[in-house]
Image: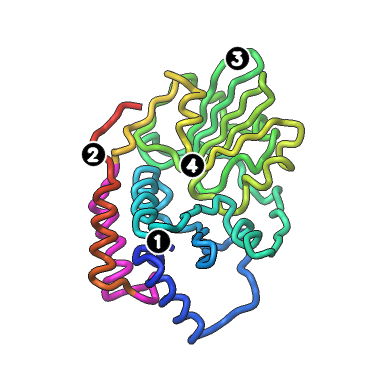
Amino acid sequence: MVDLLIGGPNLALKFLESLGRRQSHDSWTDPSWCDGGAVFDFDRRRVVFFGDSLLVEIPLRRTILAALAEIWAGYEIVYAYDGTAQIGAYVGKEFALPAFDSVPAPKLARSRNSLCHLVSVIGAAGELRMWPLWWGISSAWHGPSLLDKLPGRGVQRLRLGTIPEGGVHIDVPRNAVGVWNTADGMGVFRALPTLWRGWRTECWEDRYEEQLAACGSALRLPAVGAADFDEALNWLRERACGMDRSYAAVPPSADEWARFAAAYDRARPRTAKTA
């Protein structure tokens, strides 16, 4: 999806016009397996979109979104955390919630140095436990039964080598659950009041800092600047401008790419901070 946005409104219009010439559809992709989507509202000067694997890692995500906000000056760039359901709602299309019983059981991640999904729980007695899980689908889909499905006892202190892709923080004494994500586009935020009926639910978008603060010194994460920004930019350039343009149907011009690359460079972190 990022490939379609890096040139600003002019490139987006060219892309949309190319779709109109080739094909048109009046059906929607099933939200359970749709990888990305966007609404371009040129009247209200808003872009609502989701998708792209580059936006899963927090350091790259924030750099790219900041660069897009600069390129789309005068527009509001909105990330659709609820995926197709949010895109559809923008234009008056409603989708039923997915079947919750199809969500896979929580499973511990193999490594603490790679991407994971983090669950933290403050139990009835006030003790904190944490579980780094396999990522992809938010464990919030399990609802309160998640407390009985977590593998093992969890750990009281945790240091991760990579900021997670999403997380769930359950505070049993407060009867509250907070959820954030970067990868689950099935509509978990929209589903929270139904999934966690009787609980106070909080949608933290991609603000992993909320979970970090809730866990205090027991949870240690790397600095936001810990990412290979050059590698990510090179991959994006190859996707959008290279000979094998499997993602972007309309490539950016040399000037459009240069403007985005400059905005990206200005947005990337310069100093490392300990979290």
Magenta stretch in the rendered image: 227-250
CA gap, disc 2 and disc 1: 23 Å
Q: Secondary structure at mark 1?
A: helix
**Dot 4: element:** loop
Name of the residue lying farthest toward the top: 125
Counting from the top left corner in percent of width and height, residue 29 is at 61, 68
Model colouring: rainbow
Q: Nearer the viewer, residue 201 or 128?
A: 201
The residue identified by callout 1 is 2
Q: Nearer the viewer, residue 101 or 88?
A: 88
The structure residue drawn at horizontal position 54% and vertical position 38%, both measured from the top left corner, is 204
Label 4 near label 1: C-beta < 8 Å?
no
Amino acid bearing label 1: Val
Q: Nearer the viewer, mark 1 or mark 3?
A: 1
Q: Position of residue 220 (x, y in %)?
A: 39, 25
- Residue highlighted by disc 4: 206
Q: Is residue 196 above or below residue 53?
A: above
Quickly name the residue at label 3: 126
Chain-order first, disc 1 or disc 3: 1
Q: Mark 1, residues whose alpha carbon is within 10 Å: few (<14), some, or many (≥20)?
A: many
The residue drawn where x is 23% and y is 39% is 270
Q: Earlier in the sequence, mark 2 or mark 4?
A: 4
Q: Is residue 25 above or below residue 100?
A: below
Q: Is residue 2 left or right of residue 259?
A: right
Mark whose residue sits in front, 3 or 4 = 4
Q: CA distance from mark 2 to mark 3?
A: 38 Å
